Amino acid sequence: MDTVTEQPAKVAAAPVRPKHKGSAQLFKNPVLERLSHTHIALPVSIFIATALVSLYYGITHGFVAGLSGLGLFLGGLLLFSFVEYLVHRYVYHIPATTAGRAKFQYTMHGVHHEYPKDETRLAMPPILTVFVASLLFFIFRFAFGNWAFGILAGFTFGYAMYLFVHYAIHVYAPPKNFLKVWWTHHAQHHYRQDEVAFGVSSTLWDHIIGTMPTKRNA
């Protein structure tokens, strides 16, 4: 891809200082650059639609029903929360030990740490979202057979909720109730300890694996 190469070098050289205004240029090509931005409603809608279609097909064909169907859906939610944690920790925060890794890390996630308030880069563009949703279907169908429809519904619903929660955390002020824990947890990751607090939609795996932040105040 025709990407801008100056930005990743900063990631490898020093920690990124968050900027609360503006947006980074990732691609020299204006079409690619425009396609790298999206409104959050588009990917959220795509994943919710995927969950609903999967549920509908599974129910009408007898693959998702009763307590077993609920179990598959909840299993998909739990699976997503674990995948979210793993991807954030080991893919998005891959050590920028080479120029190629630095470029990959910045394009995939470093840009978000540098411009955390850029609303148009809080989710994948629609084209990539459709590709990911389709890929997930084939992977789940191959791995789980007819169970895939229930598990995929829970997984993609969890993905949609993750996107919504992540967007809310970065766009809206923290609420004055128990939901504030999400804002506080993610703020620790962005502004104090980016080597911990990898869960966004849930702190479950940070608790289990031991990557909870040591400081709670953002």
Image (tube, grey):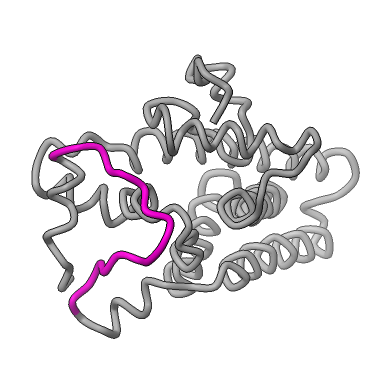
Question: Relative to 185, is 68 on the left or the right?
Answer: right
Residue drawn where x is 48% and y is 57% of the image: 117
* Residue 148 shows in the view: no
| Quadrant (top left, top right, bottom left, bottom right) of the C terminus | top right
In percent of the image, x 37 and y 78: which residue is there? 35
In the picture, which quadrant includes the N terminus? bottom left
Q: Position of residue 69 (x, y in %)?
A: 81, 45
**Residue that appears at 39% across and 31% down:** 194
Q: Which of 139 and 107 is in front in this view?
A: 107
Answer with left or right where residue 108 lies relative to residue 39: left
Give the farthest residue toward the right: 66
Q: Which residue lies furthest to the left in this view?
A: 99
- The answer to if 106 sits in the magenta stretch is no
Of the pair 38 and 16, the residue shown nearer to us: 16
Q: Is residue 151 above or below residue 86?
A: below
- Image x and y of residue 8, in percent: 17, 52
Residue 148, percent across and down? Answer: 64, 50
On the rendered structure, is 110 left or right of 103?
right
Q: Can residue 96 be seen in this view?
A: yes
Is 27 one of the magenta-colored residues?
yes
- Circle count: 0
Coordinates of residue 20 in the picture (x, y in percent): 43, 56
Which SS type dominates the magenta stretch?
Answer: loop
The image quarter in which residue 46 lies: bottom right
Residue at the spot x=27%, y=37% of the render?
A: 94
Camera-nearest residue between 176 and 138: 176
Residue extent of the magenta highlight: 13-28
50 w.r.t. 91: above or below: below
Q: In which quarter of the image is residue 41?
A: bottom right
